[in-house]
Image (spheres, grey):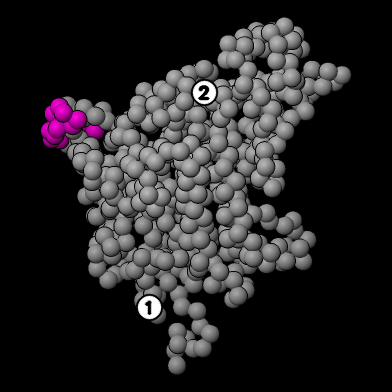
Amino acid sequence: MTAATEPGHVPEHVYVDIGVVRVQSYLSRTSSLRGHRAASHTLAAATAREAVERAVDGLAEVNAEAGEVDGVVSMRFDVVPDEDPAPRVRLVQDAVLARLRQALPAAEFTSVWGRGTSYVEVYQRQMKPRIGSGEVRYDLPPPAEFPLAAPCRTCHVGPAAGEAAVTGSRRQLCPDCLQRNIPRDTMLDDGGTPEGRLVRDLGLDRPPEMFPALAALGGGEGNHLATVAADGNAFGEFFGELARQGSLDPGLRQAKEELSAKLSQATRDALQETVYDLHIEYDYVQLCVIPHVVGGDDVLLSMPADWAWKFTITFLQRFHASVREATAELIDRLNGDRTRTGRPGLVPPTASAGVVFSHHKEPLNLLRESAYDRMAEAKREAKGRQSSIQWLDLTADGPDAPRHRPVLLAKLRTPAGEPTDADRALSRLAGVPPAHRSRLAGVLRDRGPLTAAAVESRRVGHWEAVRPFLPPLDGPPDGEPPCGIGLGAALGMARRWPCA
């Protein structure tokens, strides 16, 4: 009897991950929704299970232990005793990279691998450190053979390589934009893309084809959009602890194998439930939330501007609830060991978000970058321990980093998910006429102290709507307002608050 067939033996696998570098940046290489949507369609087709299995032709299988992450292919094969796996890894990488390069000419790819009994453990202990130190295989797009060639007339990044009809006119396009020049019906009927899955699973009508039509679905002027980026908090700490204890506790091995897929599904469930609820509330049968990236604990979306606050708050709540349900038993087991060793307990991972409001003409690639910057600010505010939101209104405040602090989700929702006093106060403030809010914001900007703003609010009325956002009158002028949100931040939030 060999070691591999002994009772209780846990088989080893070689895990190979291949992914697009900065997938969000690649998808938004072109500024239009059409180009982004086409790249998402092509990416979904190139990384689909059937396409990848055909490419590797029996060399490996799709890794069921990994969750679905846009732009990442995860494979595995059994370890053969006394055989160096490196040559076979190279063959798997060659096959998958050739497939991806053909479909995504301008993308950059990396690949990393490791071996062990569990994907979670191998990723935490081998693959993640290798990624951090740059010990990965890179696959870059070929350099331009003719540097003086005419630039692509769509992305303006790569050299033109051919001509094609785009929205009624013929343009010189680079190889990547030629691949993105896909008929609209093909893109929107693809159930493999994040957008196609929502249309299919929720039974909604197709979303607008262009950003102006999406913005028009909102209220008010109907020409503004919101770009929302969200990502999980404290997942690294959780997975690191799971890998550490899982290597010592056989009882955790099965849970480890299922966890990545469960957490990926939790993100998709939270998104789907939030989108469904908003469409019921606003009585829309057409999809009004366009997901660009949905993978692991990472999402990037566009929607009408006046949907953003309600969507973001609800999504973060739903995400936390889904993740808590998926991890509750594991966290209890992990915390038992941490308590015995005198370490603080883990809390269920949460998520934070960045929201950028803009005119629909702003390029998507710049909005994506700003949304991720705002999300990073939100994460820093809560040190990855609580859900938080940072926002920026490009039209009102310009492109620079906002001066206000991110707001914690706990300021807007109780643990039971009900609106807080601050939420209700924001709704009252949003009911103040926009001209009065604008004048109040100007006084706050020009005179500085909140007391000046308090005088102005008394003069124009609406004192009760403003009062919760001012510090106590018998305290220091820079004191904490009763609701935990300062007047400057509240006025910015009220511009797009649902009741506005």
Figure check: 313 above or below 138: above
Q: Residue 80's quadrant in the figure?
A: bottom left
Q: Nearer the viewer, residue 290 or 204?
A: 204
Q: Residues within 10 Å of mark 1 (few under 14, many from 20)?
A: few
Question: How many marks do you count on the picture?
Answer: 2
Figure check: 216 above or below 67: above
Figure check: 337 above or below 279: below
Q: Give SS at disc 1.
A: loop
Q: What residue is pinned by disc 1?
A: 80
Residue 107's disc is none
Q: Residues within 10 Å of mark 2 (few under 14, many from 20)?
A: many
Q: Give SS at disc 2.
A: strand
Give the residues drawn in magenta, as a range. 158-172
Give the Cα distance between marks 1 and 2.
57 Å
The x, y position of residue 202, in whole percent, is: 41, 50
Q: What residue is pinned by disc 2?
A: 393
- Toward the front, the furthest residue is 283
The x, y position of residue 53, in whole percent, is: 28, 65
Amino acid type for the residue under numbered disc 2: Asp
Q: Residue 175's quadrant in the figure?
A: top left
Mark found first going from the N terminus, 1 or 2: 1
